């Protein structure tokens, strides 16, 4: 069950937006989410009292972004345990809510493993629930730490590749504090460059069809007083042609063992443009996004979203008329192709930046060596 609490868009909330938090009111523990579908018009909190509400929040993209999905999944298992729901059933539902983002499964499995181990050891459901919550909190903390380390590694790489400074960076989708326990992945690198006075311009793809760039990345850039410009996805080519892009920074929802990168649809065309125009194409993601169990890009399951996300436009506080709850922009009955992600092959990726370091060139061997150094990745 979920309830919503509206906040004014003028709320002077700190830049580190609390997108997710665990609370324990008298009526019982809850998971509180910032509903990202309502941004930037208003900041509304969604209160989840059961795993089903969290599953719906994940599917509707109220909570989104690979690292944050892992954190949410872990807290979802803890919520099920503390509230007395069947933990295995809840874990399966949470893990299947969005199939491409591997971090979701990682978070769910980590909390579930902690719950199972404590239950087997003590036989006490309360201690098992506490163990799941401890695991979720640890993952939350680790992600914040990883975000800071990714930002440092990414900024060092930008300075190495672009020693003249004055970086003009193009980004896609949303990769800031809204998707992380910290300041994000790719956006965190751009933010670090901004703070050091080395970011001249952040080019923000609007990111069709759900406008995560326009609604969310622009929102975060504005809150951080960054110099940014919003553009339609299909305008990126003209920017490259004009020599206005020094680097592309994106996040990832899954990185296969060979270095293939699944990210929000529209990322692959940027990689092709970057290669043609000799511009670095850099992926920033925690090591938990690397999935050694997925051998290559062809093996990545790409989530297919509802067609109405293309045939209709939705906006907070706007009257709706379409079957999907939006404003129709296509003839009734139009079919729509709407993959949530596309896959970029490793040969188009200049570097993958993680909290453990940078992989460049991107090869299966280099990724495997990176994962071997991290306790967060299990290599089968």
Image (tube, helix red, strand yellow):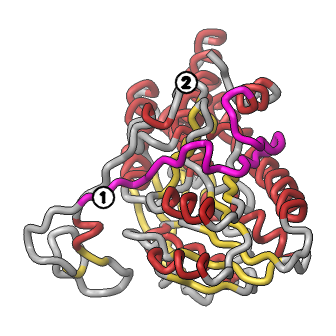
Q: In the rendered view of the protein, which quadrant contains the C terminus?
A: top right
Residue 19 visible, this angle = no
* Residue that label 1 marks: 338
Q: Is residue 119 left or right of residue 139?
A: left
Q: Quadrant of residue 156?
A: bottom right
Label 1 SS: loop
Residue 187 percent location from the top left of the image: 70, 66
Residue 146 among those drawn in magenta: no
Residue shown at the point (41%, 63%) measured from the top left: 3
Residue located beneath label 2 in the image: 293
Quadrant hosting residue 369: top right
Task: Give the mark nearer the N terminus: 2 vs 1.
Answer: 2
**Vertical relation: 45 (above or below) 227:** above
Instruction: For marks 2 and 1, give the CA distance.
Output: 26 Å
- The reply to whether dot 2 and dot 1 touch (C-beta < 8 Å) is no
Q: Residues within 10 Å of mark 1 (few under 14, many from 20)?
A: some
Relative to the observer, which residue lies in front, 14 or 248?
248
Residue at the image point whose x is 56% and y is 45% from the top: 261
Is 339 within the magenta?
yes
Q: Is residue 164 above or below residue 303?
A: below
Residue at figure coordinates x 78%, y 71% from the top left: 191
- Helix, strand or loop under label 2: loop
Taking the spot 56% from the left edge, 22% from the top edge, the residue there is: 125
Residue 223 is situated, as x and y percent measured from the top left of the image, at 69, 82
Decide if residue 333 is in sight here.
yes
Point out residue 281 in the picture as x, y percentages from the top left corner.
Answer: 67, 58
Please provide the residue range marked out in magenta.
337-365
């Amino acid at each position: 069950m979920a309830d919503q609490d509206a906040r004014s868009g003028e709320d002077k909330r700190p830049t580190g937006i609390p997108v997710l938090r665990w609370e324990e009111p008298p009526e019982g523990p809850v998971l509180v989410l910032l509903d990202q579908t309502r941004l930037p018009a208003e900041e509304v909190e969604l209160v989840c009292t059961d795993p089903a509400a969290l599953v719906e929040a994940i599917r509707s993209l109220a909570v989104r972004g690979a690292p944050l999905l892992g954190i949410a999944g872990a807290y979802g298992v803890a919520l099920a345990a503390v509230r007395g729901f069947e933990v295995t059933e809840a874990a399966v539902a949470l893990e299947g809510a969005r199939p491409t983002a591997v971090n979701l499964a990682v978070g769910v499995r980590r909390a579930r493993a902690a719950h199972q181990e404590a239950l087997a050891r003590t036989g006490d459901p309360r201690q098992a629930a506490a163990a799941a919550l401890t695991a979720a909190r640890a993952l939350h903390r680790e992600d914040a730490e990883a975000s800071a380390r990714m930002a440092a590694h990414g900024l060092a790489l930008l300075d190495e590749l672009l020693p003249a400074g004055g970086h003009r960076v193009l980004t896609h989708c949303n990769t800031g504090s809204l998707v992380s326990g910290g300041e994000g992945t790719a956006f965190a690198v751009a933010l670090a460059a901004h703070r050091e006075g080395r970011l001249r311009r952040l080019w923000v793809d609007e990111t069709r069809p759900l406008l995560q760039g326009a609604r969310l990345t622009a929102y975060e850039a504005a809150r951080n007083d960054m110099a940014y410009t919003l553009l339609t996805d299909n305008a990126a080519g003209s920017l490259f042609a004009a020599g206005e892009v020094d680097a592309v920074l994106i996040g990832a929802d899954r990185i296969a063992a060979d270095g293939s990168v699944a990210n929000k649809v529209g990322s692959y065309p940027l990689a092709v443009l970057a290669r043609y125009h000799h511009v670095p194409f850099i992926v920033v993601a925690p090591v938990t996004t690397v999935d050694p169990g997925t051998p290559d890009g062809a093996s990545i399951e790409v989530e297919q979203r509802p067609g109405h996300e293309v045939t209709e436009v939705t906006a907070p506080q706007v009257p709706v008329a379409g079957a999907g709850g939006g404003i129709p922009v296509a003839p009734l009955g139009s079919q729509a192709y709407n993959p949530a992600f596309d896959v970029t092959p490793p040969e188009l990726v200049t570097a993958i930046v993680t909290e453990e370091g940078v992989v460049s060139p991107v090869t299966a061997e280099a990724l495997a060596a990176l994962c071997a150094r991290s306790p967060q990745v299990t290599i089968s």
